[in-house]
Amino acid sequence: MPIRVLDTELVNQIAAGEVIERPASVVKELIENSLDAGARKVDIEVEKGGVALCRVRDDGAGIAREELELALARHATSKIRSLDDLEHIVSLGFRGEALPSIASVSRLALTSRTAQGEHGWSVQVRDGETSSPVPAAHAIGTTVEVRDLFFNVPARRKFVRSDPTEFQHILRHVERLSLSRFDIAFELVHNRKRVLSHPAAPERTGQEQRVAEVCGREFLQHALYIEHAAAGVQLRGWIGLPTFARSQPDLQFWCVNGRPVRDRLLANAARVGYRDVLYHGRHPAYVLYLEIDPARVDVNAHPTKQELRFRDGRSVHDFVLRTLMQTLSATRPGAQAIGPAFKSTLLDALVPDSTAGLNEPLVQVGMQLGESAASYEPHPPMATPAGTPAVGNGDFPLGFALGQLHGIYILAQSADGLILVDMHAAHERVTYERLKRLTEGQGAAPQALLVPVTLDVSVSEADCAEEHRDHFARLGFEIDRLGPTQLVVRQVPALLARTDIGALIQDALADLRERGGSLRVEDRGLELMSTLACRSAVRAHRLLTVAEMNALLREMERTDRADQCSHGRPTWMRLTMAELDRLFLRGR
Ligand code: ADP
Ligand code: MG
């Protein structure tokens, strides 16, 4: 074939192949245009999964009659003019490709009116030809109507899935965009049914309402709100507690300068920020917003503009990582944010609708509770078991031990109610954090064993011990290989001196061999500590004295991240007197 210049229609269709993958891409591009036009409200209506119709209407600035045709021309944009503008983009669009691309693979109508216009004007595109504008009734703003998507591109149509599937993609995009702009109202209608309706939410309460609708109320109930700024970068949003970790990375949302993105650098920073409190393939949940000087980030790295390139990626990465790590390390008993989350977990399980107001009549028992939890007054002092220090001040949020339940849970009385502690999980976290302090050079000196412990192991276990010699040494272990299948332990960290060292090392090696290989090098030291902490923590059914139990409670209060074990399970819960009263329908 001789060389030829492609005609415009074909060029547009090729571009459409890149940006318009499915109906959801159309919806996304149109909403982005509305946001760029300064809309306060965006209404989206789709039919049959968006293939039959995608219509987006906004109350933005509108397009003047003279520019309607231009808006549909390729590489025509009002958003940038020069390379300089490209360096600090603040709009969502800038390529001037979306409208002509969409028009080339559908039947498109564009109707718009500016503040200066007495009425609106409308144009249509058919087979690459834009009709001349005709007057149309329209409020200030723009409506773009896209019908019969891919009617002229059979190859694309084949990849379009069922209506419900395509609609799910659309919904996902609308949700992401609505999370990115709380100041804008969104409404989505599918097959004439309203599916989503978000009023503008300038305040945090409204924003949390929107987050709850998109991410689920559970998420918000188990999330901390963060806000932190340093060196011209601001991070804010909601981060799920480690106990709300998920098996899939399906609840992670990043928004940079108002643009929803999927960026690897940011995702990784968050992953590492959670590393210490999440284990074994669990994924954190979060909705996070980063504000940064637009000149420090390049959004022109990818046609769909979902990936970014930071000019100083390292410092952004560290900022995010450190902010998350510090927030999460404060999740210890008594740290305010945390108690209610666990509490509601337990209460929810016990009382089907514990979030409902207390003033709601409990119809089943024909009785009404009078007071709200907030107005609860402490009970008169109750009898406490002998030897239990008086409770009542807030210095000991976990209170004092009453006893042990089935060798698994510690029951304690605190100033405001009952504390339940998972003995093993709590001891594991406390030990883990102590081991970590050892590697940071802040723990007690290691203890030489009077009688070194000799161990018979497999060749691969012995290899593993040698390979991890440094990790062990940093914790205070001295382990040498005596022969192909024999190890000797000469020294151990003082805090593990009383455990069965032989069994502990054997367990640790087995775990390391099983999982260690799949971990990054920097995670292996943590994995070793996690294993040691788990294996040396008190087993279920061991009877503890009251003194031992109280010692554990005090240690938990001193320990960072003590609210969950290193596998992300909660270590304790609280039932306040008010909640117990409700459980027993004890009105006053
Ligand atoms: P881009 O968004 O990259 O500029 P588009 O093809 O999506 O390219 O849009 C082309 C131009 O049409 C925009 O630059 C803008 O001037 C105008 N436009 C598109 N949609 C709207 C809208 N909803 N309101 C106002 N102007 C719009
Ligand atoms: Mg655009």
Image (cartoon, helix red, strand yellow):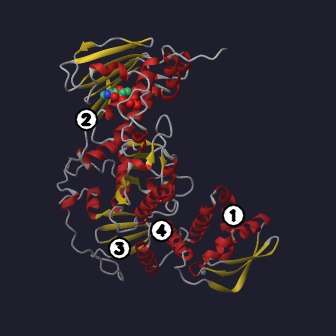
Picture quadrant of residue 131: top left
| N-terminal label among 4 and 1 | 4
Q: What kind of residue is marked 3?
A: Gly
Q: How many marks?
A: 4
Q: Nearer the viewer, mark 1 or mark 3?
A: 1
Mark 2 neighbour class, 10 Å CA radius: few under 14, some 14 to 19, many 20 or more = some
| N-terminal label among 1 and 2 | 2
Which residue does the image show at 36% across and 61% down from the upper left? 338
What residue is pinned by disc 2? 40
Q: What kind of residue is marked 1?
A: Ala
Please say if 494 is above or below 327: below
What residue is pinned by disc 1? 510
Report, in whole angstroms, how far the alpha carbon at label 1 lies from the one at label 2.
59 Å
| Residue 320 position within the rendered picture, expressed as x and y whole percent measured from the top left | 44, 57
Picture quadrant of residue 578: bottom left
Looking at this view, is 294 or 266 the one in front?
Answer: 294
Please say if 287 is above or below 165: below
Q: Report whether residue 568 is seen.
A: no
Left of 456 or right of it: where is 192? left
Q: What kind of residue is marked 4?
A: Ala
Q: Which label was assigned to residue 426?
A: 4
What residue is pinned by disc 3? 399
| N-terminal label among 4 and 2 | 2
Image quadrant where one finds the C terminus: bottom left
| N-terminal label among 3 and 4 | 3
| Residue 160 position within the rendered picture, expressed as x and y whole percent measured from the top left | 51, 23
Q: Nearer the viewer, mark 4 or mark 2?
A: 2
Picture quadrant of residue 524: bottom right
Looking at this view, is 372 or 317 the one in front?
Answer: 317
